[in-house]
Image (cartoon, rainbow, N blue to C red):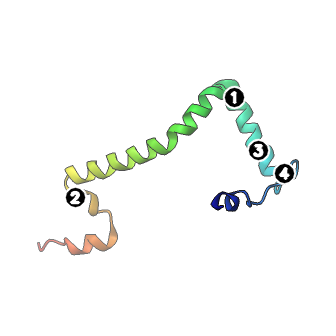
């Protein structure tokens, strides 16, 4: 019976848009990208975006980890005060 809960989602009426100007902008961008790249490759790229974001985040954290933390943390205002050197 749990699958009945999933089917109770609100369905939008076809042809009814909340903000028509935003919809027109999105479709215009999609049309341009479809002409340049192609709908097939746009669909492939959309499936890879979450994966690329995740691996990019892992790579960024690894880069910070394996480099000198102090070089990175000097740009954080609160932490910069902790590492003051007495001259």
State how far apart marks 3 and 2 are (Cα). Answer: 43 Å
**Rendered image: mark on residue 69:** 2
Residue matched to label 3: 25
Q: Image quadrant for the C terminus?
A: bottom left
Q: Position of residue 11 (x, y in %)?
A: 79, 56
Q: Earlier in the sequence, mark 4 or mark 3?
A: 4
Picture layout, residue 42 above or below residue 25: above
Asked if marks 4 and 2 touch (Cβ < 8 Å), the reply is: no
Q: Earlier in the sequence, mark 1 or mark 3?
A: 3
State how far apart marks 4 and 3 are (Cα). Answer: 9 Å
Asked if marks 2 and 1 touch (Cβ < 8 Å), the reply is: no
**Rendered image: mark on residue 3:** none
Q: Position of residue 51 (x, y in %)?
A: 45, 42
Q: Earlier in the sequence, mark 3 or mark 2?
A: 3
Closest to the observer, 27 or 15: 15
State how far apart marks 2 and 1 are (Cα). Answer: 43 Å
Q: Earlier in the sequence, mark 4 or mark 2?
A: 4
Residue matched to label 1: 34
**Rendered image: mark on residue 20:** 4
Point 19% across, 71% down: residue: 83
Which residue extends farthest front? 1
Tell me the SS state at disc 1: helix
Q: Position of residue 66 (x, y in %)?
A: 20, 50
Tell me the SS state at disc 2: helix
Asked if marks 1 and 3 touch (Cβ < 8 Å), the reply is: no
Tell me the SS state at disc 3: helix
């Amino acid at each position: 019976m749990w699958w009945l809960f999933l089917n109770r989602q609100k369905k939008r009426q076809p042809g009814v848009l909340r903000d028509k100007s935003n919809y027109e902008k999105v479709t215009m961008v999609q049309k341009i990208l479809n002409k340049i790249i192609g709908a097939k490759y746009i669909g492939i790229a959309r499936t890879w975006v979450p994966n690329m974001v995740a691996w990019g985040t892992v790579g960024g954290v690894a880069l910070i980890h394996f480099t000198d933390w102090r070089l990175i943390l000097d740009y954080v205002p609160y932490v910069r005060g902790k590492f003051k050197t007495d001259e």
